[in-house]
Amino acid sequence: MKKLLSAALLTVAALPASAEGFYAGFGVANVEANEAGESWSSTNAGVTLGYEVNEYIAVEGEASFVLSEGSLMGVDVGNKHMGAFVKFALPTSGPFTPHARLGYVKGEATASGNGVSISVDETAVSYGVGASYDFGSTALRVDYTVADFGETDTKVLAIGTVWKF
């Protein structure tokens, strides 16, 4: 996985100085986690920055921040993450473009209650599928991404808007 991240960083470093091919996105996501038969979720805001190397491959980074925590056994729990991905698109003749993603993420779960807060963070390989619908310089995008953090499985369903530069 370190080779994948290194290749993505080298690709970005070798990009031309113009903004063509760059994009940024903002959206909301439901982040659901499951560990030892217990599950919780949070509602997050997410940002994405990316570069389309060509019509088939893009590199992107993303981060999410908790908007609304979930509850597990009476304790407030939120999940946030940041990661780097390679996105593989399958261009079509119309505005609809499906894609698959493969990357590496760092996730953090924070539980708080009765004046005490505990955070746990882990890293994992992450993968998913999604699609975008282009409206010219903007697009509507939906992603479903999963990560296995050892004892904890995480699923993210996100919807957002992407602006192309």
Image (tube, rainbow, N blue to C red):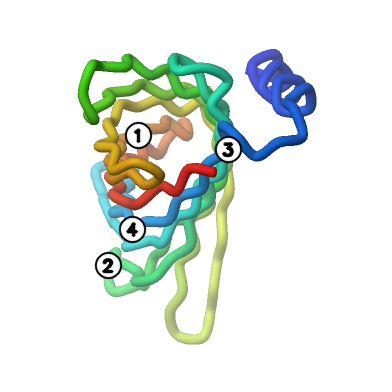
Seen at 33% across and 61% down, the residue is: 42
Q: Are marks 2 and 3 in contact (CB under 8 Å)?
A: no
Task: For the N terminus, give its image quadrant.
Answer: top right
Which sits in the foreground, 73 or 125? 125
Earlier in the chain: of badge 2 and badge 1, it is 2
CA gap between label 2 and label 4 equals 25 Å
The residue tagged 1 is 145
Earlier in the chain: of badge 2 and badge 3, it is 3
The three-letter amino acid code for the residue at tag 1 is Thr
Q: Mark 4 or mark 1, which is nearer to you?
A: 4
Which sits in the foreground, 102 or 52? 52
Looking at the image, residue 75 sits to the left or right of residue 92; the answer is: right
Across and down, in percent, residue 11 comes to 71, 20
Q: Which label number is shown at residue 22? A: 3
Earlier in the chain: of badge 4 and badge 1, it is 4
Q: Mark 3 or mark 1, which is nearer to you?
A: 3
Q: Are marks 4 and 1 in contact (CB under 8 Å)?
A: no
Task: For the C terminus, give its image quadrant.
Answer: top right
Q: Mark 2 or mark 4, which is nearer to you?
A: 4
Which sits in the foreground, 7 or 35? 7
The residue tagged 2 is 73
Q: Are marks 4 and 3 in contact (CB under 8 Å)?
A: no
Seen at 56% across and 32% down, the residue is: 21
- Image height of 157 relative to 78, above or below: above
Q: Secondary structure at mark 2?
A: loop
CA gap between label 3 and label 1 equals 22 Å
CA gap between label 4 and label 1 equals 13 Å
